[in-house]
């Protein structure tokens, strides 16, 4: 048996190396740019600090800030009315009425958002997808050729990790994070197709890799719900081949997580209507950026920067909870809802709520550097995927 295994390994290596070394180098470099697994403690700390700095430099619009501005406008107008002449009083009163109406709407939307958060935050999970790679011809897994004394992959002159399909180094893994939400008492979760299968409809780097015979494979998928102290294994039940929607399934019966309610009817999403989005934009980075420096250092030390262990440690400490953003619908099309509640990568698969606290869509895309155009798939597409 040992001889047979050795012969298979030799034949596999010969087949694989029929490709030019230039092809191999290019493909491996592409994968190396994608993967983020095998982080050192210091790299984990650095990434978290960068995420925190970015959040402080680019704060998302906050309703409290807008509310303060409107309150100041209201006071200024009242002061002007008190000293104005009769002919100006009517115009100022009209302006004050507009400001008061905007304040009333803002306060109402804020109350709706708070209700949604209190009711459904525990039902929105962080999804961790672990992707591996294998040679399509031989089936052999892609590995690091070795690790340095500090635990980092051995790198070439360009500082790219050296990879191969032979040797005893650890397998190359790509850590992908997304958002999902519980939608039935059967343990079903709705998310995006590109979260469940990160290589689906993906970028040029993955295409270059697959063109050269290296294919991605799902290693494992785990859901982390707020308040649950460990990850829960999930599998893909169904994916849509036409739209960016996937249905996952897991056993959450002991966790007592509440399923999220869908909106009904075509008028549930209306242009100009307020929306609330829950999700995990930037994945682990945003969660770590919200933790204190001492906690962050403790997590980095305990986990040695391994993403799987980091997210498990965050769950154990009950530090996983979604980010909440608010906005308004810009347009409603047959296959998408356009809105301005801010998000970014990692927020894919998050539920978009209307003013009634019901889900009208599943976040799936954004226009980078322009917060006014984010996109959700109407929830009807998710409902159809759930049908037997």
Image (cartoon, rainbow, N blue to C red):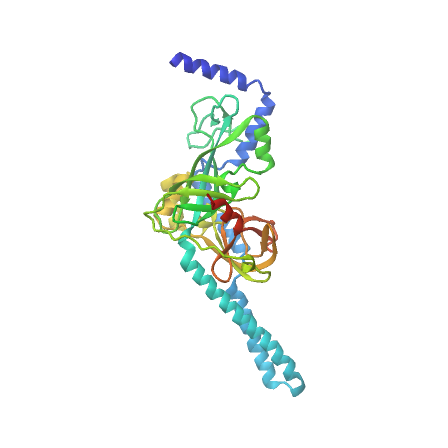
The residue under the point 41% across, 44% down is 223
Q: Is residue 107 above or below residue 210?
A: below
The residue under the point 48% across, 58% down is 358
Q: Is residue 309 above or below residue 342?
A: above
Residue 103 appears in the picture as rendered: yes
55 and 274: which is toward the camera: 274
Among the 4 quarters of the image, the one containing residue 88: bottom right
375 and 294: which is toward the camera: 375
Q: Is residue 184 above or below residue 307?
A: below
Residue 258 placement (x, y as % from top left): 38, 53
Residue extending farthest to the top is: 3
Q: Is residue 256 left or right of residue 9?
A: left
Residue extending farthest to the left is: 254
Q: Which quadrant is the N terminus positioned in?
A: top left
Residue 48 appears in the picture as rendered: no
Q: Is residue 18 left or right of residue 311?
A: right
Residue extending farthest to the front is: 388
48 and 191: which is toward the camera: 191
Q: Is residue 138 left or right of residue 90?
A: left
Residue extending farthest to the bottom is: 86
65 and 107: which is toward the camera: 107
Residue 367 placement (x, y as % from top left): 61, 49
Residue 182 placement (x, y as % from top left): 42, 49
Residue 339 placement (x, y as % from top left): 58, 56
- Count every numbered label the image shows and give the total: 0
Q: Is residue 139 left or right of residue 211?
A: left
């Amino acid at each position: 048996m040992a001889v047979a295994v050795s012969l298979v390994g030799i034949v596999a290596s010969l087949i694989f190396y029929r490709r030019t070394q230039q092809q191999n180098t290019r493909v491996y470099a592409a994968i190396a740019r994608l993967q983020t697994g095998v982080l050192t403690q210091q790299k984990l700390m650095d990434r978290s600090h960068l995420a925190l700095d970015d959040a402080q430099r680019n704060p998302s619009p906050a309703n409290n800030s807008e509310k303060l501005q409107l309150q100041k406008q209201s006071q200024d107008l009242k002061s002007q009315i008190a000293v104005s002449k009769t002919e100006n009083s009517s115009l100022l009163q009209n302006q004050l009425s507009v400001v008061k109406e905007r304040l009333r709407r803002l306060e109402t939307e804020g109350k709706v958002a708070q209700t949604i958060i209190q009711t459904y935050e525990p039902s929105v999970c962080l999804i961790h997808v672990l992707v591996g790679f294998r040679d399509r011809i031989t089936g052999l897994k892609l590995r690091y050729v070795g690790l340095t004394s500090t635990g980092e992959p051995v790198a070439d002159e360009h500082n790219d990790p050296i990879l191969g399909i032979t040797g005893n180094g650890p397998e190359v893994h790509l850590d992908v994070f997304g958002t999902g939400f519980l939608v039935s008492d059967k343990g079903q979760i709705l998310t995006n197709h590109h979260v469940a299968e990160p290589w689906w409809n993906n970028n040029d780097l993955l295409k270059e890799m697959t063109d050269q015979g290296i294919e991605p494979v799902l290693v494992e998928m785990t859901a982390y719900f707020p308040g649950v102290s460990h990850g829960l294994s999930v599998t893909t039940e169904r994916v849509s081949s036409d739209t960016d929607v996937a249905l996952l399934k897991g056993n959450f019966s002991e966790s007592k997580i509440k399923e999220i309610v869908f909106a009904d009817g075509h008028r549930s999403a209306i242009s100009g209507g307020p929306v609330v989005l829950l999700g995990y934009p930037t994945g682990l980075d945003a969660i770590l950026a919200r933790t204190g420096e001492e906690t962050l250092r403790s997590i980095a030390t305990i986990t040695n920067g391994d993403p799987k262990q980091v997210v498990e440690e965050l769950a154990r400490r009950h530090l996983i909870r979604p980010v909440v953003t608010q906005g308004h619908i810009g347009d409603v099309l047959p296959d998408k809802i356009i809105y301005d509640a801010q998000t970014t990568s990692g927020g894919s698969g998050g539920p978009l709520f209307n003013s009634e606290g019901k889900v009208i869509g599943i976040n799936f895309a954004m226009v980078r550097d322009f917060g006014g155009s984010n996109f959700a798939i109407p929830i009807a597409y998710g409902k159809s995927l759930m049908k037997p």
